[in-house]
Amino acid sequence: MTLASRPRLRWFLTACVALLSGGPLVIAVASLSGHGHRWVDILAQFVGPALVAATALFGLAVLLRSRSAGIATGLVLVLVGVAGSPQWFPARGWASEEADFTLYFANLFVGNGDADGIGRSIREAQPDIVVLVEVGDEARPALDAILSEFPHRVVTPRRPGGAGPSVSVIASRWPLAERPIDLMHAFAVAAEADTPSGPVTVAGVHLTRPWPYQYQWAQIIQTQELIAWRSGISGPLVLAGDFNSVSSARIGRMIRSEAGLIAAPGWPGTWPSFLPAWAGMTIDHVYRTPDLALTQRRIGRDNGSDHRPVIVRLVRSAETPAA
């Protein structure tokens, strides 16, 4: 017996599809509004999962052969796609013919003691620069072995955090000069790398969790401090971190508009790692100044963390940034 021969069941399923599409619709509207209120912002974080849900609902509407549900879910799918487009399709820039470099970023999770997994993940990525946050006491003793191919390192002092004490690290194949950076109750490390195509400032940060998991102004204050720090940096800058926010929501918009930085594409997702990457949220980002071009962004091999690593390949831009 088909659905066509059971009109009541078909009507019920169609109504369920239409009602469920209200969830992705609300998230799309919240993201498109650009409103910074905490309730709106927390909804805007879920554009990625909303796209997955909207796609599934559209597929169900097609299977039900419901024109009205198909149109409704199709419109929702388009709206979610538009809402997430700044996150998923940012400008990549025009690559010059200068030497490029690969950067690996990971939030290792403070309780992660899988030193072998961390090392394999980094080696497989073949990076030139490694940025790590939340290196806890389980993994910290193995840093020399994990980063044996990166002789130049900047390591922050061991600091207490919500999940336990940890350090942040920048490791490089090329010489590093540490640059001071201090954010309120946030983990941050910065250095200038002497790359073959010239100096590049590299920073790694870990902002606090958003409201309602922390008080609502914490992320905003940290981001304002980060923007103020960035204003004192000249030349190419790469800012990698766990921002606990997608790049199309409030924190990402602040970094993009006020710091003048460009995010690498936000798909596939980075968190939580137990979900398929296509269904996750990208709260781990690599931002760059316009004088750098992005040639590749990908997700790295699992390293035992609840976050997936992000790997980007960058090169000096062939474009001249506007003054």
Image (cartoon, rainbow, N blue to C red):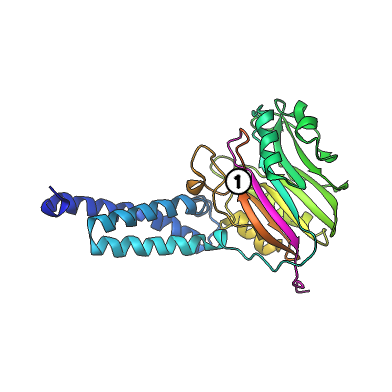
Give the quarter of the image for residue 141. Answer: top right
Residue marked by disc 1: 244
- Which residue lies at the image location 50% right of the left edge and 59% below the top edge? 31
- Which residue lies at the image location 40% right of the left edge and 55% below the top edge? 24
Of 34 and 316, nearer the camera is 316
Tell me the kind of residue under disc 1.
Asn
| Image quadrant in which the C terminus is located | bottom right
Q: Is residue 314 magenta?
A: yes
Of 31 and 286, nearer the camera is 286
Is 225 on the left-hand or right-hand side of 30?
A: right
Stretch of the chain drawn in magenta: 305-323
> Could you say where residue 38 lies in the image, as x and y percent from the top left?
53, 51
> Could you say where residue 115 lies in the image, as x and y percent from the top left?
69, 29
> Could you say where residue 207 lies in the image, as x and y percent from the top left?
66, 45
Q: Please tell me whether the stretch drawn in magenta is mainly helix, strand or loop.
A: loop
Q: Is residue 130 magenta?
A: no
- Which residue lies at the image location 73% right of the left edge and 51% below the top edge? 102
32 lies above or below 225: below
